[in-house]
Amino acid sequence: IIATLIAITPYLFYLYESVPETQVWNTFIFTFDAKSWEDMNYLMWVTTGKVIPLFLLTIWFFTCRHWWYHTILVPITMYVYQLFGMFDENLPYVDEFQLMHLVPVMAIIVPSIYLIRARMFNRMINVDKSMEELEEEFKIKPKSFLEKISDYF
C-alpha cells in the first residue's frame, strides 16, 4: 500500500491541472473560494507543492528504522507550518519567517540526535562493535504500523 501511494505521488501532484483558473471553484460536492489567492489553480499548485513532500516525509518518518529518524521531524514541521501559513489571511507573504518557528523543534531534536550519536560512539570505543552493529542495536523494530504510532503518542 505504501509503495503504491509513493508511486502515485507524481499523479497527485499534477491534480492541480484539473482545477479551473477561477476565483471560485464550484463542484457538485463543494464550493471553494480562493480568497486572497485569486486563482484556484494557483492555490492548488502551491498546496500540492507542500502536501506531497509532507506526505512523503511522513511516510519516511514512520517507516525509517535508523537511529537518526527524528531529524525528519524538522522538515515535517516546516511543511506543516507552511501549510497553516498559506491559509492565514493576515500574513502578507507565504513562507516568511518560518525559521523562527522551527527553532523550538530544532532545539529539541538536534541535541537529542547528538546525544544518541555520542552514546553510539562511546559504546563503539568501549566495546568492539562496528558502526553497523551499533546502528542495528539502536534501530526500533515495531511489530505493526499502529504500534509505531502508539510509541509516539
Image (tube, rainbow, N blue to C red):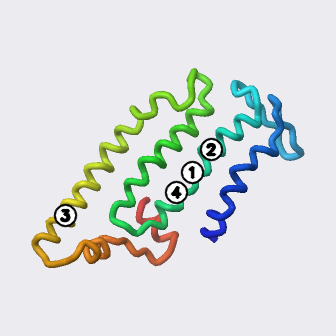
Type of amino acid at the residue the image marks with label 1: Pro
Query: Residue placed at 69% from the left, 50% from the top?
Result: 13
Q: CA distance from mark 3 to mark 4?
A: 26 Å
Foreground mark, 3 or 2? 2
Residue 4, percent from left and from top: 66, 68
Q: Nearer the viewer, mark 1 or mark 3?
A: 1
How many other residues sit within 10 Å of disc 4, few (<14), some (14-19) or many (≥20)? Answer: some
Image quarter of residue 84:
top right
The tag earlier along the polypeptide, 4 or 1, is 1
Looking at the rendered structure, which numbered label has been put on residue 119? Answer: 3
Q: Is residue 29 left or right of residue 135?
A: right
Amino acid type of the residue that numbered disc 4 sits on in the rendered structure? Thr
Q: CA distance from mark 1 to mark 2?
A: 7 Å
Q: Which residue is mark 4?
A: 58
Kindly check if marks 3 and 4 are in contact, taking CB atoms under 8 A apart as contact.
Answer: no
Disc 2 marks which residue? 49
- Tags 3 and 2 touching, CB below 8 Å: no
Under mark 2, the amino acid is Gly
Answer whether labels 1 and 2 touch (C-beta < 8 Å): yes
The Cα–Cα distance between marks 3 and 2, rounded to whole angstroms, is 38 Å
